[in-house]
Structures are given as structure tokens and as C-alpha cells.
Amino acid sequence: MTSVTAAEVSPRRRVFLEDHLWRIWFRRNNSYLRNRVTSARVTKDALHGVSLEDALSICGFGRYQRFIALVGGLCWLSCALQNSLSAYILPSIKCEMHVSSSMLGLFNAVFLAVWDSSHPPRDPCNLEAPSPAILQSAPLFNDWFYDKMFNFRSFGGLPGIGRRPVLIYGMAIDSCLTIISSFSQNFYLLLVARFLSGFIVGGPAAIIPAFVGEFQPGSKRQQVICYLGFFWTVSWVILPGVAWLIIPMNIHLHWGGYSYSSWRFIILLVSVPSLISSVLIHRYPESPRFLLAQGRAPETLDILSSIWEVNTGKKADNYPVKSLDYVTNTSAIKEEPKSIWRPLKMMLTQWQSLLAMPVLPITLLGCFLFFSNMFGYYGLGLWLPELVNRFEAHYAVSNKTVTLCDLTSKVDNSEESNEECVIPSTVFMQSLVIGSMGLVGNGLSGLLSSKFPRPVMPVILMAAAGVSVLTLYLVQSSFQNLLVSTIFQFCIGTCNMVYNALVVDMFPADISGIAICMCVMSGRLGAMVSNLVLGHLLDVSCFVPILLCAAIILLGAVFSAFIPKVPYCEQIKEQEKSVIKA
């Protein structure tokens, strides 16, 4: 058999063999790559024209990604603590500042009014497309918020700003505003500070998953985002636990005309994670995806090589990728607007599509589902610790059995008394139990959501939540209130996660981002209305707000039955098949 020397091998064949050998090397040394570097041009010592996803896969998953995920988790924990803070300081504010329930409802509403919870577009039928974020729903995450920056409502979506500055300055400003809230001696100053805090922290809360996700290789992104979501849900346990330890200590400091009590110290503690997050983000660069979208390829390669260096321990100069494929990485990125009006025009065009047939019924359905769910979740849910406090305050001085509505006159009398305010530790212990059940619901929603038809879980959960609200009218003890409140929080919170998962693929891919924004905006409107209604009516006619809340939630259960049984893209495919058969 005649052997063939290297000189006799044709140049084309030689290039083919070199490419083949390099691919074998990458497969052996980067098992996570999985044949993904398919479009790159391979030379003897470098890869050229590599897509960003492939470049991240070559970097691997290691210490760099874990550390940035922890920093992002701390940022999100800070935002989650801000989101839930009001529920655990309401009894103390009412007691110390002698404000009415209607003003407490306004206190909750102003923060929710400016909290940004928009979601990005995603095509659920396109496996190559980045998946969306499901706020507060760790097990239901699917690479969510990966395209968040290019959503107009996101702070990071403004051309040229990026994620990193929004996170750094947003968290720092939020920390300062929270400290101001802690020292506010006037209720209205506290109200303004909380309003500004809600406005500022909404931007970082929306961008964090995108910032973290864009440093992860595609094979690990979903898993990392799931773990990131845990930091949000764990706040439901941390905050009542900390409040349980600190507020009953009855700290009262006085100097000059200022006073500083236990609940103010809770607010001060909440500012610490925000400040630490801002400092830690300084250690990390801008998102490589954003930089590449801005045409800053050299900076992107520097970041990728630094990730490679940290993960592998090799020198950054040895990173094999020498150039990136602009087309692959920017194909889904819109051109920078030529004027400040272009984003507004595009948004109005998408709104017109949402309000036109055949999408209009789905738009109305999604908006009402979120309105009804968050009417209870962020409305009545934020009042649960206050309801527990009312029962504890009554049974501390009397053994007479009363219902929730019987406590109205006692609340009015307590506001007129000058007795020292004491918040029982039981209030926070029970809030801790309620928050823990929220974590359980978070886990179950991820395990069970794919095992039932799409409308089943929302119908059952919303119906159970509505019935539990009606049961509040009948409770006669703090334990009964705890039991009913736990069931309510479990059902309404779990359903909120399921709604977030389902609404993503109810709309066409090109308008799904603005559609989800509209749905969540409707939900926030429901939360605001609920807080204002509860605040104004709870001490006047207790039965009316309870009945109203239950009725709206039960209506949400009824309309949940009309949730499409398959994603929108699958409906289109089925229609195309039926047309072809016809």
C-alpha cells in the first residue's frame, strides 16, 4: 500500500484536515461545546467569525460566571426586599405616625405605581431565540430577560446606556433613598422617598437577569437564571425573619427633635444590600452582548478572554477566538433610533397590533388575568401582617371572640389613645410562615405546570384564593387568620408565577414584549386600586372590600378557563396544516 506524503496532499484537503483536527481538539477540551462552533473560520492557531454564543461556550462555565451570578443574586435580593418591605413596617408606621388605613393604602400604592415589571419578547417556538423572564418565578425561568435591554420600557433599553451603569447608579441611588426613608420623621416625606425608591429600583430589577444571563454559556444559562430567581423568593422568608428579631426589641433613640425606632432600623438594613451590590458591580465589565450590539468588538473580545483566563487558568492571549460574527450576534438587535421619536412610534405600532383582531381578545384576557391576580397578590397580600396585628392587639386585652370586621371600632379607638405602641412578635412569626408557603408554591409551580393542561392550574388556584378571601370574613382568631392567609398567599402567589409563564407565548413573537408589558401594567394597576380600596374601606365597611377582592379573584378564575391550550405559534402551525390539508 502506497503512503501519501504531506506534500502530495492537495491544499484544499490540507485545510479540511486542519479544520477537522481543530474541531476534534475543541470537542475533547471543551465538552460543553457540543459541536456548536460550526460557522467559524478556523486557521492554524485561531478561530474567526465565531458567534457570541459559541464564544461564550468556549469560555466554559466556571468561577467567573458563578461569582457574577452571586453578585446579580444579591442585587435582585435587594430589589425583592424593597418590594416586600411595606408589608412588615405598616403596623409600626400606623402606630407611631398615627396615620389612617387609607394613608397606609396610599403608602403601598405609590411604590407599586412606579415599579417596573416589563418583560422581553421571545419566540417560544424558536429554540435559538432567548427566552423571557418570569418575575418572581424561579422554577419557571427559561433564560428570561435575555433580550431585556432592547425592550423600550427597560431603563437599560435606551441606546448606548447599557446594563452596568443602570445597575451601579440605580442600586446606589436606591440605597440613599432608603436611608432617607429610614430617617424620615414626617409621613409625607417617607411617602415621597418610597415613591422615588420604587421608580429607581424598578430599572435594576428588570435588568439584573439580562446582565447575569449574558455572561453565561447557553448550556448553563437556564440553570443559572433559575438559581438567580431563588434570591427573589428567599426574601419572602428573610424580611419577616429579620423583622421578627428587630422590631419587637422596641428600640427608641432620641436626639434633638428626631426619634429612631426599631422599624426604621429595618429600613436602614434593607439599604445595605443595595449599596454592597452597587460596589460589587463595579468589579465587572459591561455585558458582552451589549458591547457587540454597539459595534465594540475589541472590548467584547477582551471581556471574553478575561472570562477564559479566570475559568481555565490560562493566559488571556491564548483565548482561541480572535474575531466575532457581527451578523449572527446582531441579527435580532434593532438599529439605534435615528430620533427620539422612533421608539415611541414603534411602540404605538405594536400597541395597534395588540388592539386589533385577532389578537385583541387575547390582549384583554391577559390584562384582566393579571389585574385580578395582582389585585389580591399585591393588594390584600401586603395587608396580611396588619390583619394579624389587629387580632393580636385585640386578644392581648380581651378574650372576647370577634371577627375581622368587628375589629374596626377597636382600631379607631386605638388611634385616639396615647398608649405606647407594641407590635407582638407573633405578627412576624406568622408572616414568616406565610412567606415560607410562598417558597413552597414557587417550587410546586415549576414541578406541576407542565403536567396539566394550561388552564387547569390557574383556574384551581384562583378559585381557591377567592374562596379563602371570603373565609376571612368568618375568621375569629389569629390562628384561623394565619391558616386562611397562608392558603391565600400560597394560591395567589403560585398562580402569579403560572400566569407569568403562560402569558409569554399567548401572543405573536413580534409583539410579545409589549404585550407582556401591558399585562403587567394592568396587574400593577390592580394592585394600586386594591391598596387604595382596602385602605379607604377596611375601617369603614369591612365586608365590602373583602367581597370585592373575592369577586375579582373569582372572576379571574372563570376567565382563566379561556387561556389558550397551546402557545400562539403552535396555533399558527395547526392552522397552516389544516389549510394545507384542505
Image: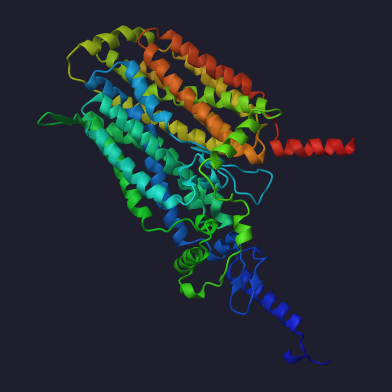
From the viewer's side, name the closer residue of 312 and 108: 108
Answer with left or right where residue 167 lies relative to residue 506.
Answer: left
**Where is the N terminus found, in terms of image quarters?**
bottom right
Residue 246 in view: no
**Where is the C terminus found, in terms of image quarters?**
top right
From the viewer's side, name the closer residue of 419 and 327: 327
Compared with 287, 203 (above or below) is: above
Q: Position of residue 493 (x, y in %)?
A: 49, 29
Q: Position of residue 4 (x, y in %)?
A: 78, 90
| Residue at 46% across, 74% down | 315
| Residue at 70% across, 31% down | 565
Taking the view exactly as shown, the residue that stands out farthest to the front is: 339
Give the tally of numbered discs. 0
| Residue at 43% across, 24% down | 381
Answer with left or right where residue 479 lies relative to residue 272.
Answer: right
The figure's colour scheme reads rainbow
Q: Position of residue 391 (x, y in %)?
A: 33, 16
